[in-house]
Amino acid sequence: MTPETLAEKVLSATRDAFEALGLDAAVLPAATAVERPRDPKHGDYASNIALQTAKKAGTNPRALAEKIAENLTSTDGVAKVDIAGPGFLNITLDAAAAGEIAGTIVAAGPSFGDNDSMAGHNVNLEFVSANPTGPVHIGAVRWAAVGDALARVMRASGAKVTSEYYFNDAGSQIDNFSASLLASAKGEPTPENGYGGAYIADIAAEVLKRRPDALDAADPQEVFREVGVDLMFAEIKSDLEAFGTHFDVFFNEKDLHDKGELDAAVERLDKQGHIYEADGAIWLRTTTFGDDKDRPLKKSNGEWTYFAADCAYYLDKRERGFDKLVFMLGADHHGYIGRMQAMSRAFGDEPGTMEILIGQLVNLLRDGKPLRMSKRAGTVLGLDDIVGAIGVDASRYALARYSADSSIDLDIDLWTKHSSDNPVYYVQYAHARIAGVLRNAADRGVDKGEAYDASVLVHERESDLLKALAEFPSVVATAAELREPHRVARYAEELAGAYHRFQHDCRVLPVGDEEPTDLNRARLWVVDATRTVLANALALLGVSAPERM
């Protein structure tokens, strides 16, 4: 029995209790949930539905809980129901009902964990979005891991998700980048505010290879800009794909200008009554919607501001049919939240249409000391540096394992250990260990069979593992709802721990020439179910599930 199934039974028992007591069922929620108690002695699951609804119904919560408990106790799969405190329901399942989850998981396979908590939502998820002036820096790498994992958990929760990368191939940063390429090609020093590092020389050389006439062109810097940006962005795309991060859309800011979308956005805002002119510039009255000051859209010299492009880009997304826009930005963009939310409201959208997630800094440590410089980029650390140090799997897992709004220190020594101290190794080893058990079973001709007797699964370690397995769909749904994929990583570690304890205390395969028993077969179902859930959890994080380690 899954927690979701039990919750439905609790709600049904509550409806019956309301009817028996002559209470108004209109106060009942459309759905409820059950939770695992911290102390296993309090049962398998707990519900506070009596406390939630008794006051609204005008009755005593404990009296209501007693009636609900009476109804639940007669429900298939429920062994007993205890009432604690003013009306908490502590529910214990019988072994057969608790053990059924293993069969459910094996039958579902890769789809176990999928849920419909975000069904009907069309989400645009934008992340990384680094300008093509250099390799992806380590802060953006964090978003590559977290953003991709978030896209996966939202899709698993029923949402239609489009992952998007927004880039700008114009502006002063691109000018400095192209000037740096030109200087390198000429053998000159890096210009002021330019970019250094070995990658600049590499790209400059590639530009000359593709355009031998570049230095003799009427505008050499324009040649280096055009070809160099294409080369740099192609490398960024390739690196992200190799990292396991796929984008459905690459959106160029220049397209907004070329298609006149900035003018269209200002016109829309003007019709909404939020545009005014002052000091020769055009302004958006964002203070109406909580911003600390109004924001200019067009300067007095006729140039568009970056914020005008933000407005046009937001409107473009909305007109593409997305009802939920999620932007993942770096720590230096915290000040954008107020103006962006105000802009969304100025377009007439409800709060919650747009979400802005801010990611904090990442430090890479070796021997307890921060690494500062990238040999290739000559500046901050990037994707190559972290992947080169600990590998793709460990990088993705480590970066997605923590709440994005907290700074993290990644210790290279820890994340390369082949021990339980290394979280990704701990989880992957559990999966590989299970794969070994299943191989041994096959080699010995021990088949789990088409069905199993779940009632024999009465050991405490079996119960703990089964309850942990049953939690996976709700973990995925919560990770999607709260935009916190790190919950999946932490869950995977807890599940791996539950499995290691189970295998230590519960012999899965018969010894020697012993004939397989119903208990051996039932435990093989539990083992197979655990393998499935670990693989599914790792897949949501974009991390491999090895068969051997």
Image: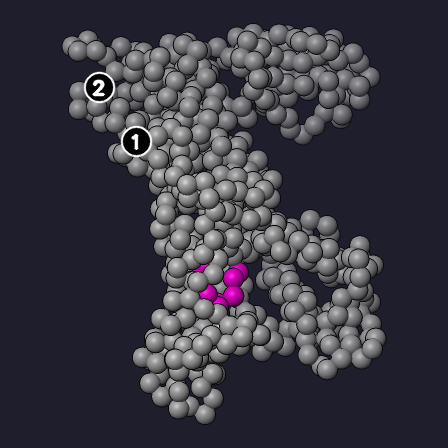
- Residue named by callout 1: 432
Residue for point 69% across, 56% down: 335
Asked if marks 1 and 2 touch (Cβ < 8 Å), the reply is no
In the rendered image, residue 546 lying in the magenta stretch gets the answer no
Look at the image and give the residue range highlighted in magenta: 129-137
Which residue is depicted at the point 30% across and 31% down?
A: 432
Residue type at the position of mark 2: Val
User: Is 468 drawn above or below residue 131 in the view shown?
Assistant: above
Residue 463, position as x, y percentages in the image:
44, 15
Q: Residues within 10 Å of mark 2 (few under 14, many from 20)?
A: some
| Secondary-structure class at tag 1 | helix
Marks 1, 2: nearer the viewer: 1
Q: Which disc, if any, is residue 446? A: 2
Crowding at mark 1 (Cα within 10 Å: few <14, some 14-19, many 20+): some
Task: Provide the secondary structure element on which disc 2 rests.
Answer: loop
Q: How is the image coloured?
A: one colour
Q: Quadrant of the C terminus?
A: top left
Q: Is residue 466 visible?
A: yes
Q: Quadrant of residue 474?
A: top right
Amino acid marked by disc 1: Ala
Q: Is residue 100 above or below residue 293?
A: above
Q: Determine the residue positioned at 34% across, 13% down.
A: 506
Q: Is residue 389 above or below residue 90?
A: below
